[in-house]
Image: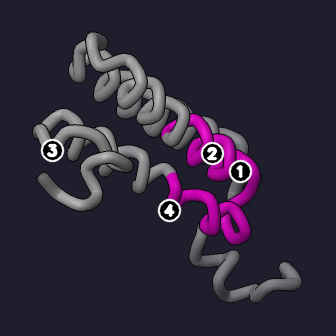
């Protein structure tokens, strides 16, 4: 028995994957500073999805994993569609933080 088992749950493959999905969601939170509120929403949604999977052990991982992938694809698409027309990431980097 691991000393982290009471906190993290049983050491099975499903639990490890759910924690990995939750940590990926967590890493989106500080990225929201640079990439905007959609990334913050993505991070919170991914962490909530992983938490639901951890709490509902009878829920199939396929459902949680598919939901996680859909969240990332849909919110990533939203980010692409909501950017200013004709403006690329390269232009943003060249202009600097002030946009000029």
Dominant SS of magenta comes to helix
Residue 95 shown left or right of residue 41 in the figure = right
User: In terms of secondary structure, where does tag 1 sit?
Assistant: loop
Secondary structure state at the residue bearing disc 2: helix
On the question of residue 77 being in view, the answer is no
- Residue 9 vertical position relative to residue 1 in the rendered view, above or below: above
Q: Looking at the rendered structure, which numbered label has been put on residue 11?
A: 3
Which range is magenta?
26-46
Give percent across and percent down for residue 87: 69, 63
Q: Earlier in the sequence, mark 1 or mark 4?
A: 4
Name the secondary structure under disc 3. Answer: loop
Please say if the residues under marks 3 and 2 sit with CB atoms less than 8 Å apart.
Answer: no
Residue 63, given in percent of the width and then of the height, sits at 30, 16
Precedes in sequence: disc 2 or disc 4: 4
Query: Circle 4 is placed at which residue position?
Result: 27
Gap between marks 1 and 2 measured at Cα: 6 Å
Q: Which residue is mark 2?
A: 79
Q: Is residue 29 above or below residue 41?
A: below
Residue 33: quarter of image: bottom right
The C terminus - image quarter = bottom right
Which residue is tagged 1?
83
97 or 9: which is nearer to us?
9
Q: Residue at x 84, y 79 (%)?
A: 99
Task: Report how far apart the C-alphas of labels 3 and 2 lie in the structure.
Answer: 36 Å
User: Which one is nearer the viewer's eye here, 23 or 9?
Assistant: 9
Q: Are marks 1 and 2 in contact (CB under 8 Å)?
A: yes
């Amino acid at each position: 028995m691991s000393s982290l088992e009471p906190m993290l749950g049983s050491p099975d493959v499903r639990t490890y994957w759910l924690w990995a999905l939750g940590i990926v969601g967590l890493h989106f939170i500080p990225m929201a500073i640079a990439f905007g509120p959609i990334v913050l929403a993505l991070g919170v949604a991914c962490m909530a999805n992983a938490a639901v999977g951890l709490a509902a052990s009878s829920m199939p991982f396929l459902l949680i994993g598919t939901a996680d992938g859909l969240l990332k694809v849909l919110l990533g698409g939203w980010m692409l569609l909501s950017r200013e027309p004709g403006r690329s990431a390269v232009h943003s980097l060249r202009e600097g933080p002030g946009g000029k």
